[in-house]
Image (cartoon, rainbow, N blue to C red):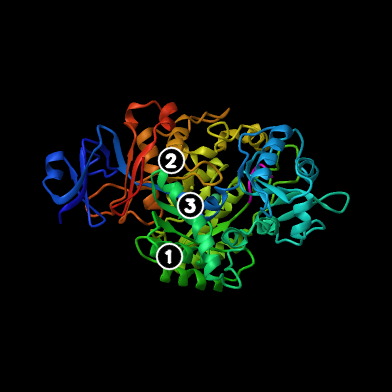
Amino acid sequence: MQAELIITNARVLTMDPNRPRAEAIALGGGRILAVGSRQRVEAIAGPNCQVIDADGRTVLPGFVESHLHLVLGGAELTHLQVGGLYGFDALHRAFADFSAKNRDAPLLMAQGAGYAMLDHPMTRADLDAMVPDRPIAMAAADHHTVWANTAALRAAGILHGLVCPHGHEVVMGPDGLATGELREFEAFAPVVALGGEARLNLGIATGEEPTPWPSDAEMAIDRAKVAAGLRHCAMHGITSMVNMDGNRFTLDLLDGLRRQGLLTARVKVPFHYKPHMELSALDRAEAMSRDYNDDWLQSGFVKLFMDGVIDSRTAYMLNDYPGMSGHRAEPLFAPARFAEIAVEADRRGLQIAVHAIGDGAVRNTIDGYEAAARANGLRDMRHRIEHIELIDQADVPRLGALGIVASLQPPHAPGTMDFALLPTMEVIGATRWADAYLCRSLVEQGAKVAFASDWPVTDVSVLRGLGASQTRPPYSGGVDERLGLMESLHAYTAGGAWAAHREAVTGSLSVGLAADVVMLTGDVEAVAPESIAELGVALTICGGQITYSC
Ligand SMILES: [Zn+2]
């Protein structure tokens, strides 16, 4: 086959151990046709071949974003962004501006709030003082807490409380009314629904399908939001993504975008297994995996939440939270229950990805994977643990031994990128800092690592994430947990593809794999880790099609 597009004069980092470096690459028919010297690649140029002179810039495999929430991220691009704002006045001004620009919005929704934004725990009274007469709400950057004003609570019908599943809570005040703090997805779903985004929230909240099934017009509205998310990711060089919430509806939206020619990345979407479900629910996971299983859209895995997050003290810990005798939160799945689910999912050939943040949740998850390996034999399942913000040292070598993937988010380590050290490090407590946000320690003890942003929890920028992974500070008592440039790049490309069982499709620049390529605006090896984020993405190609160029 003749090449349709050639990139020459590049610093190609292939992530293929057989040929780590090259100066040119040829693409055709959606595939990589040649990788090597300029002469060799130019020799297969077709008659109308587009030739791009990279002028010494870095060319890499398209980035694999291993943990994100595409649908939520896309929808939130139009919300108010309050990340980095502190104090009542700054927030008040932001909401006032946003309110003036969005006169008809049924809900003014903000994203990116910090738990220590005000000098006291946020209540609906604080938000009422900013906007008294319209429903407003604000989500924490971690997306596990929403604060709403009285108008929003009333409109959502939860001012007087709401019965929620275990782990989800409409926090009530001494006056018998909701305080405005809504913990976890099912508690804040009614408020989010006010903004017309209930359908898009189902994948993370209940994992159920929308009922009634959306009309064509509603599907079109939702598709537009997902398309905006895809465009945003293409801008950051992302060509593959593992969505970490989902249902069949999510795949159907993406399939619709594919028919419109707007699917600019390969997306995996899980079946979201909730604590109340019977094992037979895995039939639905299998059906999704059967119906969506090609190079672009795929399911094939089950997502579970084992716990919440540190800042709201819903992460399940092995020890009490500092200063809170008896409180270490609870796992969302009891150990025996999770083991039963893991054994059955594994038996059915479904990969498992578990959100586990506290060291107790991480241990429960590993124990369940171990039970699956005992029951079904240790096969190449690549079960994953998402986040691992705290881990007991005794559990660290178990990941490698059991073939478990550590799906980590370099931007999340407090004090590294956008998340401040406080309150998180204080909630963890100094005695546990040495075991917080491990990365190099996991790698050195045999864990396979995939990197991600958890967008929209943090900025989806892979370049900023690369900087974070190489510059994160050591915590008192701990060791240096940074990874070097090549290891970090690997975790954003080949490592992520492997963790998603996609290494035969993408993740490295090897002949025969999909033509998923990113070119940066400079030479990534020539810039200091502190300055990597100043580089940009010049060109993104997915399946041979240019999905972004600047
Ligand atoms: Zn997530």
Q: Residue 136's spot in the image, x, y percent?
A: 71, 48
Q: Nearer the viewer, residue 121 or 90?
A: 90
What residue is at 58 percent from the left and 42 percent from the top? 390
Residue that label 3 marks? 228
What residue is at 72 percent from the left and 37 percent from the top? 92
**Amino acid type shown at disc 3:** Ala
Residue that label 2 marks? 462
Queried whether the magenta region covers residue 311, the answer comes back as yes
Left or right side of 381 for 140: right
Could one spot residue 482 in this view of the protein?
no
Q: Secondary structure at mark 1?
A: helix
| Residue at disc 1, CB closer than 8 Å to ligand 1 | no
Provide the residue span drawn in magenta: 308-312
Left or right side of 276 for 535: left
What residue is at 51 percent from the left and 72 percent from the top? 284
- Magenta stretch, main secondary structure, is loop
